[in-house]
Image (spheres, rainbow, N blue to C red):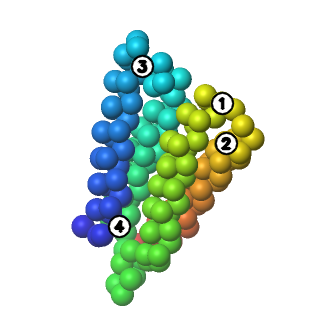
Amino acid sequence: MPKLTRWLVKASLIYLVLALCAGIGMAVPQAAFFAKNFPVYLHLLTFGWLTQLIFGVAWWMFPKYTQAQPRGPVRLGWAGFSLLNAGLALRAIFEPLNAEMPAALFGWMLVAAALLQWLAGLAFVVSLWPRTKEK
């Protein structure tokens, strides 16, 4: 299993545990903090767990790029991994802050988080696109 796949799958499992903990926190009536942070829960679950798991398996299982470079541009895959996790971290930090005390800075940090996640998706598409070819 390629190193990038291992990192993506392990990170996805960590995000799954974090999302499940946030889900439990949202179910506790006394935990008002968690109840207001459904968007964080949703991002941890969909982008943190599901998207990273899909990216990791796709990176591993898609057809070879070339014999010399079976996975193609590996740096682009690592860039996608880094961008996605940076975006998730910003989202997890600034979504609750913006919910508690809205501020322009917090709003712009959420825009930056969304941009990083979009760039991560673009990096993975660009890195995997050449591997979707006929035999």
Q: Secondary structure at mark 4?
A: helix
Picture residue at 47% right of the left edge, 45% below the top: 47
Q: Give residue 36's position: percent from left, percent from top.
A: 53, 23
- Amino acid type at image mark 4: Leu
Neighbours of disc 2 within 10 Å: few (<14), some (14-19), many (20+): many
Picture residue at 24% right of the left edge, 67% below the top: 1
Q: Which mark is residue 101?
A: 1
Labels 1 & 2 near each other (Cβ < 8 A): yes
Q: Which mark is residue 115?
A: none
Q: Give residue 120's position: percent from left, percent from top.
A: 54, 59
Label 3 vs label 4, nearer the camera: 3
Tell me the distance, in whole angstroms, between the alpha carbons under discs 4 and 2.
31 Å
Disc 3 target residue:
31
Q: Secondary structure at mark 2?
A: helix
Say whether disc 2 or disc 3 marks the residue closer to the N-terminus: 3
Q: Which mark is residue 106?
A: 2
- Amino acid type at image mark 3: Ala
Q: Give residue 61's position: percent from left, percent from top.
A: 32, 62
- Relative vertical location of residue 33 with respect to residue 91 in this rendering, above or below: above
Q: Give residue 12's position: percent from left, percent from top.
A: 35, 49
Disc 4 target residue:
4
